[in-house]
Amino acid sequence: MKKFFSFLLLMPLFVVTNAQIVITYGDMPSAGTYITQTTDTTPSSALPVFITGANINWDFSALNNHEPYSMGFLNPSTTPYFSHFPSANLCYLAPDSMFGYIEANPSYVVALGARMKMDTTEIIIQYNPDDTMIVFPYTMGTTFESHPNTVVKMFYGDSINLGFGNVYIDSIRMTLSYDKNTVVDGWGNVSTPLGIYPALRSTRTEIMEQEIAVHYSNMYIPVNTSIDTSLVIEWSMKNTGVPLITITADASDSSYSSVDWLTVSPSFGFNEMNSRNVINIYPNPATNEITIGFEDETPEFVIVSDIYGREVKKINTNAEAGIHIDITDFSSGVYFISAANKGETYATGRFIKQ
């Protein structure tokens, strides 16, 4: 009889721990959130990528950390491209100086566009209509569509052969049209090298049509068109706003060549610092200079590293309680600060160079 009642008492706990999660607007990241991710460039073909259904255990614990990178979320009004996206209430800064602009509300999240660089050319991409990234509540069975379009014009300044000899082309126009269909088709637990997390699986079918046209004789002449279809498979969980795992597969044969995954544990929140002492960094984000203040203990050295872990600058503090660092020549992106005494790092921090 005691065993029977014990079983009844444990049943609600079992049901709760194995119930599917529901992702809401409250799970979105806020300005000041920083995350670290990486890419496995040689993933196993035996990964459980295409398993769908309820109460599934997906084992990705053998993923490799080949190409680490970071991403920071900002208040868009503090960024240099906010005027292009005045309705944005969140911005993310990704590698290669990419600023992505988002509008999030309790019903959905849409991407408005981005600023990026192609070689040395600055490009502003604006979606019309917006690109729907997620709808709320987001749970098993959720479906939604997105059909963003964008047109980008850029200087070319060279000659090409249009079939009647070489002609000078001053600019090109690239038109991108997307048809995206997303379905949440699985729930369960995902194992990564960091731990086991309750998650939702989704499949997004993306059809991208691209047209490239050249400007000649006061008109744009199409010179290339292409259509590409891909499958984007993601596992998402609460409190992150960023997928745990993302895999893009070829729609024709389901092959994939890389896996992106989160390398900071979602269990403890992205903003927590696991340090004994505190580094104060301001302003953050910054453009030309940062000031670093120390509490309790002044380090011998401060080391600045980029998102790939490479040392960018090392500064002797000379026992000062605060130092200034010129970051004018730094590329835009996320950087890490390490404070060290006697060869041991005892405190860390992060800042964004705009």
Image (spheres, rainbow, N blue to C red):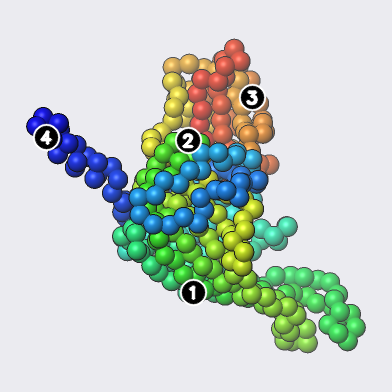
Front residue of 195 and 134: 195
Residue plotted at (34% across, 63% down): 141
Quote the CA–CA distance across marks 1 and 2: 35 Å
Please indicate whether residue 328 sits to the left or right of residue 25 in the image.
right
Quote the CA–CA distance across marks 3 and 1: 49 Å
Q: Residue tagged by mark 4? A: 5
Q: Residue tagged by mark 3? A: 315
Three-letter amino acid code of the residue under disc 2: Leu
Q: Are marks 2 and 3 in contact (CB under 8 Å)?
A: no
Instruction: Please identify the quarter of the rendering in which residue 266 is found.
Output: top left
Q: Residues within 10 Å of mark 3 (few under 14, many from 20)?
A: some
Three-letter amino acid code of the residue under disc 1: His
Residue plotted at (40% across, 60% down): 185
Three-letter amino acid code of the residue under disc 3: Ile
Helix, strand or loop under label 3: strand
Q: Residue tagged by mark 2? A: 194
For discs 2 and 3, the disc positioned in front in the rendered view: 2
Q: Residue tagged by mark 1? A: 147
